[in-house]
């Protein structure tokens, strides 16, 4: 398996622009997580899905952030409009509840810089 | 709610020396405990996990951790570190039966020759 795939790996954009981050989970995994990592706040869970349905979005910072999972093999995290304080590394992770292993497999991350 | 405390933000150590990275958790219910490692510019990778059974858990790369319920701790140890162990290490907890993880703030392990 190729693991969790994220794109793009790096994104530089100007304040006010829309940013879309993409994630392809491991085939067969039914949970998908979006995290944000910054020096100041560490690793934060933004939202997670089970069987394509959002379960907990309490970590989404504000309405500028939205996440979708239209099917089992694809998810997006969108920021509109972006702000400099959104600069961070965004990780996607997936796991399966079927095996009850609780091991989350992380993607390589997208480094977002908002100028 | 669960929370995780990693007491040391950075641990410097010489190569081939032993190391212990500390993790304490708080929870009123049964928990599952994890250690993840993050190498520079990479995602997190699972080192080991405690779900049930033996309180001494062995993971990859020679790491092990001991679950101590009375002290609510899950410290990570390695008897002899290598330069390649230089990375950030995260302790995490999940409530039994739930997939959501709560991560600690991380401990940066710096191994020097």
Image (cartoon, rainbow, N blue to C red):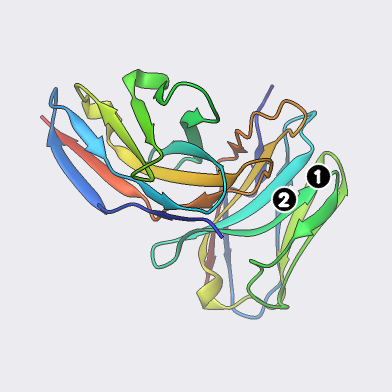
10 Å crowding of disc 2: few (<14), some (14-19), many (20+): many
**Which residue corresponds to the image point at 25% horizontal and 41% vertical from the top-left?**
B109
- Badge 1 marks a residue whose secondary structure is strand
Question: Counting residues from the N terminus, which is met first, the one under dot 2 or under dot 1?
Answer: 2
Image quarter for residue A77? bottom right
Give the number of marks: 2
Real-space Cα distance between discs 2 and 1? 7 Å
Mark 2 in CB contact with mark 1 (< 8 angstroms): yes
Image location (x, y in percent) of residue B31: 55, 42
Q: Is residue B22 left or right of residue A7?
A: left
What residue sits right under mark 2 in the picture?
Answer: A22
**Which residue corresponds to the image point at 67% horizontal and 77% vertical from the top-left?**
A62
10 Å crowding of disc 1: few (<14), some (14-19), many (20+): some
Q: Is residue B96 left or right of residue A44?
A: right
What residue sits right under mark 1 in the picture?
Answer: A74
Image: B3 above or below B97? below
Image location (x, y in percent) of residue A115: 51, 75
Residue occupying the far right of the picture: A70
Please give the chain letter of the residue carrying mark 1: A
Please give the chain letter of the residue carrying mark 2: A
- Badge 2 marks a residue whose secondary structure is strand
Residue B17 shows in this picture = yes
Q: Is residue A101 left or right of residue A41?
A: right
Image quarter for residue A42? bottom left
Image location (x, y in percent) of residue A33: 67, 49
- In the depicted view, which residue is nearer to us: B49 or A70? B49
Image quarter for residue B37? top left
The image quadrant where one finds the N terminus of chain A is: top right
């Amino acid at each position: 398996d190729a693991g969790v795939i994220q794109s793009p790996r790096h994104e530089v954009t100007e304040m006010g622009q829309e940013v879309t981050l993409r994630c392809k989970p491991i085939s067969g995994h039914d949970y998908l997580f979006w995290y944000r990592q910054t020096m100041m706040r560490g690793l934060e869970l933004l939202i997670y899905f089970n069987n394509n349905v959002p379960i907990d979005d309490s970590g989404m910072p504000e309405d500028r952030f939205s996440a979708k999972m239209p099917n089992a093999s694809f998810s997006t995290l969108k920021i509109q409009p972006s702000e400099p304080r959104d600069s961070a590394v965004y990780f996607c992770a997936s796991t399966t509840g079927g095996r009850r292993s609780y091991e989350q497999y992380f993607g390589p991350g997208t480094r977002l810089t908002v100028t | 709610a669960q929370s995780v405390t990693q007491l040391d933000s950075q641990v410097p150590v010489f190569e081939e020396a032993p190391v212990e990275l500390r993790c304490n958790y708080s929870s009123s219910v049964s928990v599952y405990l994890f250690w993840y490692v993050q190498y520079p510019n990479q995602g997190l990778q699972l080192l080991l996990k405690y779900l049930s059974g033996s309180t001494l858990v062995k993971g990859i790369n020679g790491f092990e951790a001991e679950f101590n319920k009375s002290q609510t701790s899950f410290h990570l140890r390695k008897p002899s570190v290598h330069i390649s162990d230089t990375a950030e290490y995260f302790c995490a907890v999940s409530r039994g039966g739930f997939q959501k993880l709560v991560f600690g703030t991380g401990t940066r392990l710096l191994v020097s020759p």
